[in-house]
């Protein structure tokens, strides 16, 4: 693909910024799993990713739904959101974040508790259901 370098350069300059160096330590911990999610259609896996470098230790949670009967690799959608994983689905077993969440409003960013964004608040924005 000849356009790939230009596309990556565009995203680095205009969207995401420069990719930081790999942290000194990176851990992937399976925090929860369920084999009968989304009405029995999917397996749910919730991972906590823990990153440690010179700036300290930070973590974030990743929610993964896999087709229940998939025999091999399947396509994936990566959908970051700033309302917590529980806000993209009404699945009651999705882990509630422990950190404050920020909601952009006309007057700026406002700090909110995860409970302020109930399960499924933005589920129409994600390719989950």
Image (cartoon, rainbow, N blue to C red):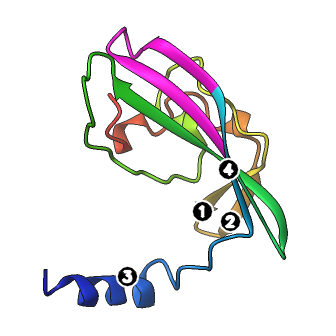
Location of mark 2 (residue): 109
- Please name whichever residue, 52 or 10, is drawn nearer the observer in this view of the structure: 52
Relative to 102, 71 lies left or right: left
Measured Cα–Cα span from mark 1 to mark 3: 25 Å
User: Which element type, helix, strand or loop, lies under badge 1?
Assistant: strand
User: Which element type, helix, strand or loop, lies under badge 2?
Assistant: strand
Q: In the rendered structure, which segment of residues is drawn in magenta?
A: 32-49
Quadrant including the N terminus: bottom left
Relative to 52, 109 lies left or right: left
Measured Cα–Cα span from mark 3 to mark 2: 24 Å
- Please name whichever residue, 1 or 117, is drawn nearer the observer in this view of the structure: 1
Image quarter for residue 126? Answer: top left
Q: Residue visible at 46% across and 13% down?
A: 35
Figure label count: 4
Q: Residue visible at 35% across and 38% down?
A: 124
Location of mark 3 (residue): 11
Instruction: Report if residue 108 lies within the magenta region.
Output: no
Quadrant including the C terminus: top left
Q: Which of marks 4 and 1 is in front?
A: 4
Q: Is residue 6 above or below residue 63?
A: below
Residues under numbered marks 2 and 1 in contact, where contact means CB atoms less than 8 Å apart: yes
- Please name whichever residue, 99 or 57, is drawn nearer the observer in this view of the structure: 57
> Which mark is first along the chain, 2 or 4?
4
User: Which element type, helix, strand or loop, lies under badge 3?
Assistant: helix
Q: Where is residue 67 in the image (x, y as percent from the top left)?
A: 30, 24
Dot label at residue 105: 1
Location of mark 4 (residue): 60
């Amino acid at each position: 693909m000849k356009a790939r370098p230009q596309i990556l350069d565009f995203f680095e300059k205009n969207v995401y910024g420069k990719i930081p160096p790999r942290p000194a330590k990176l851990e992937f911990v399976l925090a929860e799993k369920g084999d009968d999610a989304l009405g029995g259609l999917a397996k749910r896996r919730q991972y906590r990713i823990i990153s440690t470098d010179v700036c300290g230790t930070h973590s974030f949670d990743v929610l993964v739904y896999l087709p229940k009967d998939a025999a091999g690799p399947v396509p994936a959608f990566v959908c970051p959101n700033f309302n917590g994983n529980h806000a993209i689905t009404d699945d009651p077993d999705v882990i509630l974040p422990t950190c404050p969440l920020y909601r952009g409003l006309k007057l700026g960013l406002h700090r909110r508790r995860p409970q302020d964004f109930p399960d499924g608040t933005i589920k129409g924005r994600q390719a989950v259901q």
